[in-house]
Image (tube, rainbow, N blue to C red):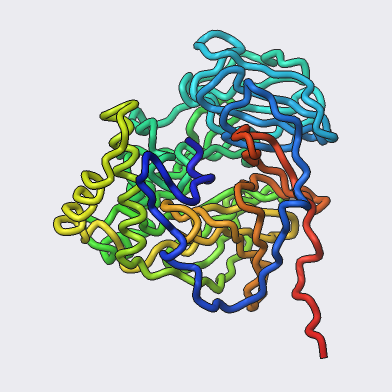
């Protein structure tokens, strides 16, 4: 299940209403609201069951990735026509197993690269869906990333991006099972063959004092570092504790830093119960597949957990749960909000321009998950239509400035 889409859960009479958990208070700044009518949707395809990632390639075509079903890769023209699908499941050349990330290639001859985490390799496709060369194994730790982590947490497991002549990979050497495990991850720098060249950052060492201050057992709804690469070729990191952005070039130099004005939610019992309700529902489905959900059992499980383990939650939720970077070091942060999802995925993104003090937000339509901002101020992402079909979609951004106040 795509946890970005969770708004209100209702299963066999069991309802967890999330609207009361936050987001009602007056907040500073200005919000630009994009209506659902402004969204352009590509045609639905029955073989596309869940969208993991969406990017544009160097010639303007759009690629979508699904992780758990085959074919794994979908290529669209700029007008939304489905051109080809690639990548059956398996270990052989041209096959994929648990692909997690799409990365634009260098030109029309090498338009896309795919981080195939299950087979531990980067697969390079040409525009005809042929594998360009023999993929080399990616060197990362042998730790376990638990398969359903994306159903239980924000954060992108094993995130990979192009960087310089190689890649950046977020590795999880101490296993990844809860949100708090992201705080002990490492950023690895890989060469073009997937060989590890250096640790760019060890989050556990970098944030050791802050992690201690969170509490010995805190691992739910905790702040985590967010990073991505920018059109400039730089990497940008959002520090979840000092709320600073740090830009780093491929030669290892920090090119700029800036602070971000943030608004954080205090983690109330309503937040905790919404999150735990989702956790208990997932457990029920796993342990009793097909059996009607017993709301009394789940409510009692929530009560018992809160009596014994309230120290697993922090006082404040994270300032943000996802990050994107556009041109000119414009950084977008998805604000944490359990008003929309028990995992904190919301509709609103805070936009940070270098040196900007005022908070400006864009609120996307419900169900739209943005993945990339192009130079034409077009945001590509995914959407689930009225029939429950996931589709690629985009919205065009209006001028990102507050509307003039009428006199």
> Residue 172: where, in percent of width, then height?
38, 39
> Residue 350: where, in percent of width, then height?
61, 64
Does 269 sit left or right of 226 as displayed?
left
Q: Quadrant of the C terminus?
A: bottom right
Residue 250 in view in this figure: no
Does 342 sit left or right of 127 as displayed?
left
> Residue 77: where, in percent of width, then height?
82, 30
Q: Is residue 291 above or below residue 8?
A: above
Q: Residue furthest bottom?
A: 407
Does 285 sit left or right of 23 as displayed?
left
- Closest to the observer, 195 or 75: 75
Residue drawn at the location 62% of the way across and 32% of the way down: 389
> Residue 235: where, in percent of width, then height?
60, 51
- Closest to the observer, 50 or 157: 50
Residue 305 in view in this figure: yes
Image-quadrant location for residue 261: bottom right
Residue drawn at the location 35% of the way across and 46% of the way down: 14
């Amino acid at each position: 299940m795509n946890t970005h889409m969770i708004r209100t859960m209702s299963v066999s009479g069991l309802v967890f209403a999330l609207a009361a958990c936050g987001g009602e208070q007056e907040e500073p700044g200005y919000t630009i609201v994009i209506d659902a009518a402004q969204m352009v949707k590509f045609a639905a395809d029955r073989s596309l069951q869940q969208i993991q990632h969406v990017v544009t390639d160097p010639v303007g075509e759009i690629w979508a990735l699904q992780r758990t079903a085959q074919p794994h890769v979908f290529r669209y023209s700029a007008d939304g026509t489905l051109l080809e699908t690639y990548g059956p499941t398996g270990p052989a050349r041209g096959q994929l197993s648990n692909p997690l990330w799409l990365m634009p290639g260098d030109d029309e001859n090498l338009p896309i690269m795919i981080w195939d985490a299950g087979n531990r390799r980067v697969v390079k496709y040409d525009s005809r869906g042929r594998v360009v060369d023999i993929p080399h194994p990616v060197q990362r730790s042998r730790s376990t990333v638990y398969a359903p982590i994306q159903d239980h947490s924000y954060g992108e497991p094993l995130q990979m991006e192009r960087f310089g002549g190689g890649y950046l990979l977020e590795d999880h050497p101490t296993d990844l099972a809860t949100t708090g495990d992201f705080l002990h991850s490492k950023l690895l720098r890989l060469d073009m063959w997937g060989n590890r060249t250096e640790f760019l950052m060890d989050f556990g060492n970098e944030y050791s004092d802050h992690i201690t201050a969170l509490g010995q057992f805190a691992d739910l709804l905790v702040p985590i570092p967010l990073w991505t690469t920018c059109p400039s070729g730089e990497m940008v990191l959002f520090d979840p504790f000092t709320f600073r952005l740090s830009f780093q070039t491929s030669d290892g130099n920090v090119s700029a830093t800036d602070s971000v004005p943030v608004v954080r939610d205090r983690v109330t019992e309503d937040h905790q119960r919404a999150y735990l309700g989702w956790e208990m529902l997932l457990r029920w489905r796993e342990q009793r597949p097909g059996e009607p959900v017993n709301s009394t059992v789940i409510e009692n499980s929530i009560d018992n957990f809160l009596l014994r383990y309230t120290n697993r939650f922090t006082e404040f939720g994270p300032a943000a749960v996802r990050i994107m970077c556009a041109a000119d070091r414009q950084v977008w942060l998805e604000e944490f909000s359990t008003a929309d999802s028990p995992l904190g995925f919301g509709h609103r993104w805070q936009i940070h321009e270098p040196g900007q003090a005022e908070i400006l937000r864009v609120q996307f339509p419900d169900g739209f998950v943005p993945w990339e901002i192009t130079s034409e101020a077009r945001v590509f992402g995914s959407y689930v239509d009225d029939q429950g079909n996931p589709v690629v979609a985009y919205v065009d951004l209006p001028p990102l400035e507050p509307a003039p106040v009428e006199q």
